[in-house]
Amino acid sequence: MTLTLVLTVGLGALAAGYVTGLAGFGTGLIALGFWLHVIDPLLAAPLVVICSLIAQTQSLFTVRHAVNIPRLWPFILGGLPGVPFGALVLDYMEAGTFRAILGVFLVLYTSFMLWNRSFPMIAWGGRTADAVVGFGGGVLGGTAGLSGPLPTIWCGLRGWAKDEQRAVFQPFNLAILLWALVAYWALGVLTEEVGWLTLVCLPGTLLGARLGVRSYGRVNDRQFRIIVLWLLFASGAALTLSNAF
């Protein structure tokens, strides 16, 4: 490992950890902007999953008091079977096409929400709708590695407070990421090199997540929704542009 590689990977982990601690998601969005300059995508993919698990586990303790199992379980029960279904979709549609469609949707949706002064709320559907959204998140996770956007958007539309939102979409993402990690292990993707890179990322991820959690404590519900929308907008723009060129 070169010094440039170690510094770039470490800084990416620090920045991604901070954003995850602040918003509850966004590890891949931030980290890949650093890592893909110095490491192969085949190494970056499992590294994102590992660092996201570390950062989200640490930051989840901040909202553990808001975890509501009856509210959470429909998302997870819907999401887990969605992952293999999403993998099957790849036989009929390329992952790049799927990412581009999702990217355009995220840009349009977040642009409308940021432009609109009042945030709309959805009260209908109950647990069935929550399970459908979870399934959609699982499908996107299996197809394009993007399990987070749909549940994150839905939690915001439910009108829940910031702790209540994170207490749903973070455990959901953890469940999907753990399953992805098991799949990586079964496929032999978790190589020795991934292990060494994880050690490089660990200090930055832990420190960044800790700093992000502190920043999270200083924002109110409306500020949190705006932060989430801007991160989703950035994610959508990145997905759209990466598949356009």
Image (cartoon, grey):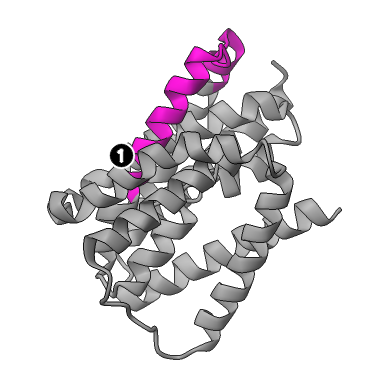
* Corner quadrant of residue 48: top right
Q: What residue is pinned by disc 1? A: 58
Q: Position of residue 158 (x, y in %)?
A: 30, 72
What's the residue at 63%, 30% (across, down)? 44
What's the residue at 77%, 52% (across, down)? 242
Is 26 situated left or right of 74 in this image?
A: right
Q: Residue furthest top?
A: 192
Q: Position of residue 161 (x, y in %)?
A: 25, 70
SS of the residue at dot 1?
helix
Q: Position of residue 240 (x, y in %)?
A: 73, 59
* Corner quadrant of residue 196: top right
Is 16 situated left or right of 7 in this image?
A: left
Q: Nearer the viewer, residue 8 or 177?
A: 177
Q: Nearer the viewer, residue 195 or 84?
A: 84
What's the residue at 59%, 49% (across, down)? 29
Is 79 situated left or right of 107 in this image?
A: left
Q: Residue furthest bottom?
A: 117
Is 50 situated left or right of 76 in this image?
A: right
In the rendered structure, which amino acid carries the disc numbered 1?
Gln
**Residue 236 visible to an observer of this rendering:** yes
214 in relation to 122, above or below: above
Q: Nearer the viewer, residue 22 or 230?
A: 230
What's the residue at 38%, 30% (across, down)? 178
In the rendered image, the quadrant that contains the N terminus is: top right
Magenta stretch mostly in which secondary structure? Answer: helix
108 in relation to 60, above or below: below
Label 1 Cα crowd, 10 Å radius (few <14 / some 14-19 / many 20+): some
**Residue 220 visible to an observer of this rendering:** no
Magenta residue span: 170-197
* Corner quadrant of residue 112: bottom right
206 in relation to 214, above or below: above
Q: Is residue 190 magenta?
A: yes
